[in-house]
Image (tube, grey):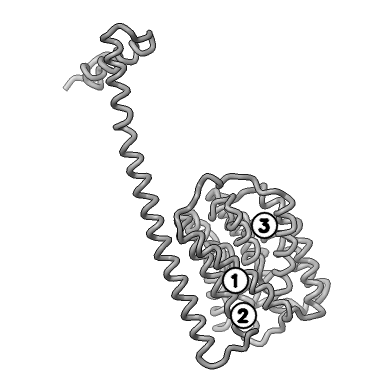
Amino acid sequence: MRKLLILALVGLAAQLIDGSLGMAYGLTSSTLLLVAGVAPAAASASVHLAEIGTTLAAGVAHWRFGNVDWRVVTRIALPGAIGAFAGATLLSSISTESAAPWMAGILFTLGAYLLVRFARPLRTDRVGGRLRGRFLGPLGLVAGFVDATGGGGWGPVATPALLVSGRMEPRKVIGSVDTAEFVVAGAASVGFLIGLGTEGFLLPTVAALLVGGLIAAPLAAWLVRIVPAQLLGAAVGGVIVLTNARTLVRSAELDGPAGPAVYALLAAGWLAALVLAVRALRRTHRVRAEAANAAPALAAPADVAAGNAVAAGHAGPAVVAAASASAFDDAVPGELAVTGTANPR
């Protein structure tokens, strides 16, 4: 019972991270199961079966909070399902450990790019552009395959790629990736069922992870909506870098103090990026506030010019009417101007 409670808490924490950052549910859960001695295929199968429920809840929550771009979801979900089914079938018979360092290197590079990108003021002129299907299709296929073979990877592959494109808000990237993962998790589970049979699924573990994830899903969807894009992007980049650094350090066989030194250096870089992101966010807010305060000052000269035009007799009917209405509003109490009669005091 104690073990199941711990697994439920892990599922809650993993879904909270995944729902707010768009990744790490499968990675966190699979890592724990592997540490506990579960076979890689069984660990991935159990996590994906639990993800059917957690991603459904997360998708509904993200949809209610307006975090989903359905065009993106439909274009990455089907290729992702195909890749996940193929990956699950493959993992049921062979290991993919040799490919881990290469994939970790790609993800590490994308994460580092995100740290640099979101540490500076964001450009908003590109947000809202359309992502092409020839980009989304292959992305979904690769992300689904990596997700099934690695026990997690849909978010770490799809989320940074969409963020780097600069065509979507971070919250919509996360919401769309989480929503599409429901289809991917279902396809992977079918593949594992065919390759491993029902004995490949650890049902008590699945139930514990599912309960924790269902509790966290609505909270994560709300959190991603209120967290500023600047901080969210920097946080995602740091998670990607530190997550994949572990694989790279192991593959490089860095023993002794070298490994901890690398982690400390990367953590310091992440902290610096977050500080820069906060400063950039404050600067953006200050610029917007100054622009909002300057708007009334710019409108005042226009009113004066209209009044002068009326006095000189050079104004058209529309300007005269506007100036007359403005003068009437200034001379008559507000209640009388609206209703035509003054309320008794």
Q: CA gap, disc 2 to disc 3?
A: 28 Å
Label 2 amino acid? Leu
Front residue of 311/69: it is 311
Front residue of 153/17: it is 153
Name the residue beneath numbered marker 1. 108
Q: Position of residue 98 (x, y in %)?
A: 73, 81
Mark 1 nearby-residue class (10 Å; few <14, some 14–19, many ≥20): many
Name the residue beneath numbered marker 2. 248
The secondary structure type at the circle numbered 1 is helix
> Residue 180: which numbered mark, if any?
3
Mark 3 nearby-residue class (10 Å; few <14, some 14–19, many ≥20): many
Q: CA gap, disc 3 to disc 1?
A: 23 Å
Which is nearer the N-term, disc 3 or disc 1?
1
Front residue of 131/301: it is 301
Q: Position of residue 73 (x, y in %)?
A: 67, 52
Mark 2 nearby-residue class (10 Å; few <14, some 14–19, many ≥20): some
Labelled pair 1, 2 in contact (Cβ < 8 Å): yes
